[in-house]
Amino acid sequence: MASLALRSSASGLLGGHLTAVLEAPTLLRPVFQPILSLASGTVVGYEGFSRFEIGPARTPDVWFAEATRVGAGAEFQALAIRRILGVAEETGLPTGTFLSLNVSPQYLAHSTVEAAFATADPSRLVVELTEEEAVFDYRALRRAMAPYLRRGVRFGVDDAGAGFASMRHVIELQPAFVKLDSYLIRGMRSRQTIRAFLRAINGFTVEIGATLVAEGVETPSDLAILRETGFPLLAQGYGIARPSAPWPDLKLAVTRAWRTDGDSWSKPPLRRRARAPGVGQSAALPIEDGVNIGLALASSLRRAGIDDIEALRMLGAVAAWQKLQTIEADAATEWAVVALEGAIRGIRWGAVPSAERRRLVAAITGITAG
């Protein structure tokens, strides 16, 4: 048992404190941080974290590292997962959002960790693989990921560009989300190399269908620069909202950045200027600037009468695909309907939940068969 291992460990006081958490799980308090889509100005997900309600005052990573050292790493990761999922279920994960949790690659296949995930809705779950240790056997890690992927769970690579979470993680694992290390985001205004890096990695993630997440957005200037790039990034950090009890609101300065009046949301200025809104209306994001929508698909959509993302959202992916099919059958592919759904959600096509992808493909298959 983990508690026996902790009591007999040489860590003494720390071992006793960790045992106390296992025996009183409420000492591990879940908090949640919003993940913002820069393409839509809306929250698309939340990341769950754990806070230890015991002394001495230590950061969570120190406590989890201590648990690993005394042989209870899997038990503590499983406890954190159960606590986060339990609070999310009790309070109700907001509609249309996903929940992201961190897991160490070495514990992904552990039966205790697998059991902790058993009650989660896989279509709304993202498992972030942490960077705390090197991965020497990617084949074994892919085998560990396989049961989760079959259920429809999506994966993310955490802190890409730092430590062991190198770009090899992204190449080997083909994740749905790539989270950039916060160091790469902070202070971007004076570091042209970071902007160049964002351009390069955005091009790479476009090809594999992954959604890029910028962590460490701490200031309004960081957020402004990310918006100015025109890339359909997700963003997360204290400058957007601090981790807190479910479900934290965005900072007022962030919400104002997407407002055109007191009641309406507008879309961020991406690669081209949006159409000027009328009185009491929100600015409409041109269809060319939607996530996954290149110039060729945008041209076909415009011929089908779909000029902006709001029109696409009102129609829905399947109805938009039908209109596309009547104009240009060759453009109405299975990939296109998934890409349209991603554009509506503000994420890359590869990050659309697998269950939703199957539903979309089945829907258009029924249309063509009829």
Image (cartoon, grey):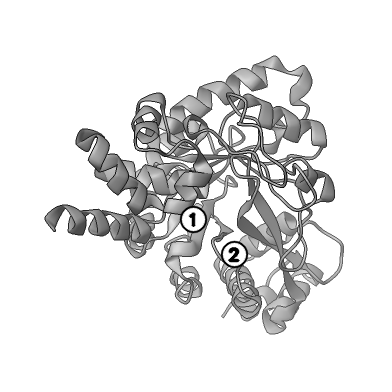
Residue at image point 66% right, 36% down: 268
- Percent of width and height locating residue 232: 56, 36
Left or right position of 261 against 341: right
Q: Is residue 87 above or below residue 32?
A: below
Q: Secondary structure at mark 2?
A: helix
Left or right position of 280 against 114: right
Q: Which residue is mark 1?
A: 106
Decide which of 92, 67 is in the foreground and name it.
Answer: 92
Q: How dense is the environment of label 1, judged by Cα within 10 Å: few (below 14), some, or many (20 and up)?
A: some
- C-alpha separation, residue under disc 1 versus residue under disc 2: 10 Å
Residue closest to the far top: 192
- Percent of width and height locating residue 308: 50, 38
Checking the image for residue 137, the label placed there is: none
Residue at image point 72% right, 47% down: 280
Residue at image point 55% right, 67% down: 74
Decide which of 17, 287 is in the foreground and name it.
Answer: 287
Q: How dense is the environment of label 2, judged by Cα within 10 Å: few (below 14), some, or many (20 and up)?
A: many
Q: Is residue 37 above or below residue 112?
A: above
Residue closest to the far right: 56
Residue 248's image quarter? bottom right
Q: Are marks 1 and 2 in contact (CB under 8 Å)?
A: yes
Q: Which residue is mark 2?
A: 73
